Image: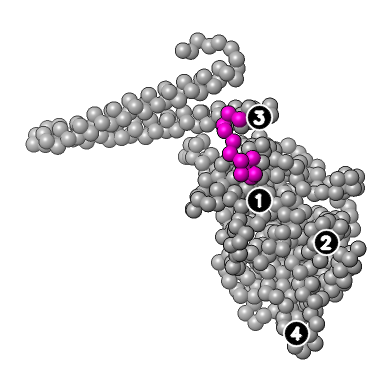
Amino acid sequence: MATQIEIEDYQRFMLRGFTAQMLLDIDAITNRELNPNDLNVPLHPLLERQRWMEFTDEYLQTLPPNYIPTRADQYSASIDSVWDVMLPSLRLVSVILTNIHSHPWVCHMLG
Amino acid sequence: MACLSAETKLLAILMHSLHLNFMDAYVHPLSGDTRRYHQAGTWSEGKTRIYILLAWQEVAPLFRNDLTSSQRLVQQMWLAKVLLHEIIHAYSCAIDIFNVSLPPEEWQAGNEPYFGDEQVSELGCSMENGFFGGVQEPFIDPQDVAGLAPRLGIFLTEWPNDNPHHERPILLDPPFSRWKVAVPIPVSYFEMIQSNDFWESHFRSFGSIKPGPAACAAIRDRNIPNNPYWNIVTNTQLSSILQNQTISPIAAMVNMTPDERALHANKLRTASIEKFYRCIDARNNTVHLLVDQGEICERHKGPPDYHIFETEMQRLLEAIRLMISRIVDCVDALKEVESGREKQVGRRTCYQ
């Protein structure tokens, strides 16, 4: 069984010098309940559900000939459970994209 | 407003040609390479298709029903960051499509695919640095763990960097900053940025989505080759270090805020307790050594092994001396721990 020191040394190795206790102290991890994602912004048109593809035969023909089937083939935005877990993140991306277009970085990139 | 009209044109290209789908993180969709973890990829084909592929392994942890509220917020932020990163690449593909003036027959396929976090994806990292104040890296790297562990937390790291997964030539001039920096983002940030309230009211006033200054950061000297050791420094120390000022330890302590003092005191106390435990561990290891050596001496007690017995007895004496010195270390370490405790509690004890 690992001693406390060994556990903390492992944590420091994995967490760039931090132990779990230190991260807890500075609130980078926590046990308290936080408010969940409650964004209700409309989805950005680049992320809407229809834009995600299905693994239809037609789509498979567009893939390179050495395509390797993987578990990714079971994932699709048309599956409700998949779409539902992604939605909070998609809404966050949407709200960032629609609000950040006047950011100086964006103007710099677009020249 | 030039950038707005450019953005509108790029958006039109993307609206026409962007498709999203899933991929496997360990199977590069174009090359079939299975050595690395790629969280997502973006590439263009001809002038009419831009693909963003998202690794299913980035979505899978969200299906777990054992995530705490903060773990879920972190995982959701991470997924959003990955998608945002890819969308920036997609914009870059759109720029190439937009800039091409050759007739369609002579038009070559667009630039090479941006995959995972290659150096050429500095555009995505540059975006992260611009929007968030640094490049996000997870506490738990999916390459280091089996199964579908959530990221648990996010570090903000310095940009530009020379992380080993960059596979493109890197310009050596200007040189990279000496310090690799990793700042843990407080969970309150993930709660705030995913709250409707923040976007409706506070964002209008402040306009920034950067996490606030951190209580402390991890830094590592890039100039020391193969150096795995990170040092934890406070926010004040970090600013001085990054500005290349050397600070004397006394000056550093005098300039501490009360919070930083408490953190420092805790750090010292934890260090002295850990030192004590290490001494105990060393002493315990020596017990085995003593027992074994004692047995060896027993075995060689009778004739004809007198010379062997003498050697082994010497070894036993050495082991006993080692044991004594380790017990002395334990006592010294314990005294240090106790003296720290006195300062904290601030009352007299019976200990000398």
Q: CA distance from mark 3 to mark 2?
A: 39 Å
Q: Nearer the viewer, mark 4 or mark 3?
A: 3
Q: Are marks 3 and 2 on the same chain?
A: no
Callout 2 amino acid: Cys
Residue at position x 89%, y 55% in the image: A41
Callout 4 amino acid: Trp
Element at label 2: helix
Residue A79 sits inside the magenta stretch: no
Residue underneath mark 4? B107
Q: CA distance from mark 4 to mark 3?
A: 62 Å
Residue underneath mark 1? B157
Residue underneath mark 2? A107
Q: Quadrant of residue B10?
A: bottom right
Q: CA distance from mark 1 to mark 4?
A: 38 Å
Q: Quadrant of the N terminus of chain B?
A: bottom right
Residue underneath mark 3? B255
